[in-house]
Amino acid sequence: MTFDEHCLDNWLSDYEAFRREFLEYVYFYSKAFGYYPQVDFDRLKAGYEAWVAEVGIWQQSLVMPNSNGLSHFKIMAILLTNLASVDWVKHTFPKWHAV
């Protein structure tokens, strides 16, 4: 996963880029702790779409016109809130479990 100054703009504009890079991160750390998450891709996409919509609301209505816009920290907080609002992980299996 490339997390640089363009990452969030890329994610906000392209679900497939988000899904690919986000799940690469999730699988890497899950494997390190000995687990394999079974992802519900429809719910992950619903969480993603809610994130994009909420960021749009913030940018269009809630951010002061003369500001620098939303910080990366705020955009990530909105992402985490929206992903926590949907059950996008169906099950989590120990790595020894055959999936």
Image (cartoon, rainbow, N blue to C red):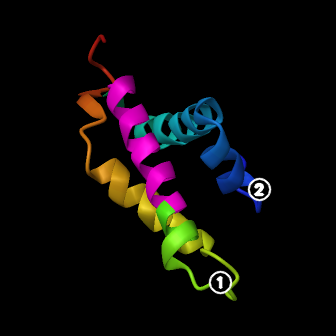
Could you tell me if the residues under marks 2 and 1 are in contact, i.e. CB atoms within 8 Å? no
User: Which corner quadrant holds the N terminus?
Assistant: top right
Q: Nearer the viewer, residue 54 or 16?
A: 54
Question: How far across and how far down the image is residue 75, in percent?
Answer: 53, 65
Q: Residue 86 — which label?
A: none
Q: Main secondary structure of the magenta part?
A: helix
Distance between the alpha carbons at the discs numbered 2 and 1: 22 Å
The image shows residue 20, relative to residue 33, as above or below, that is: above
Question: How far across and how far down the image is residue 99, in percent?
Answer: 31, 12
The image shows residue 37, relative to residue 75, as above or below, that is: above
Residue 1 in view in this figure: no
- Label 1 Cα neighbours within 10 Å, binned few <14 / some 14-19 / many ≥20: few
Of callouts 2 and 1, the N-terminal one: 2
Q: Which residues are magenta?
A: 39-56
46 sits left or right of 23 in the view: left
Q: Residue at x 53, y 59 (%)?
A: 56
Q: Amino acid at mark 1?
A: Pro
Queried whether the magenta region covers residue 55, the answer comes back as yes
Where does label 2 land, which residue? Answer: 6
Q: Quadrant of residue 68?
A: bottom right
Queried whether the magenta region covers residue 36, the answer comes back as no
4 sits left or right of 44 in the view: right
Where does label 1 land, which residue? Answer: 65
Residue 53 in view in this figure: yes
90 sits left or right of 6 in the view: left
The image shows residue 99, relative to residue 95, as above or below, that is: above
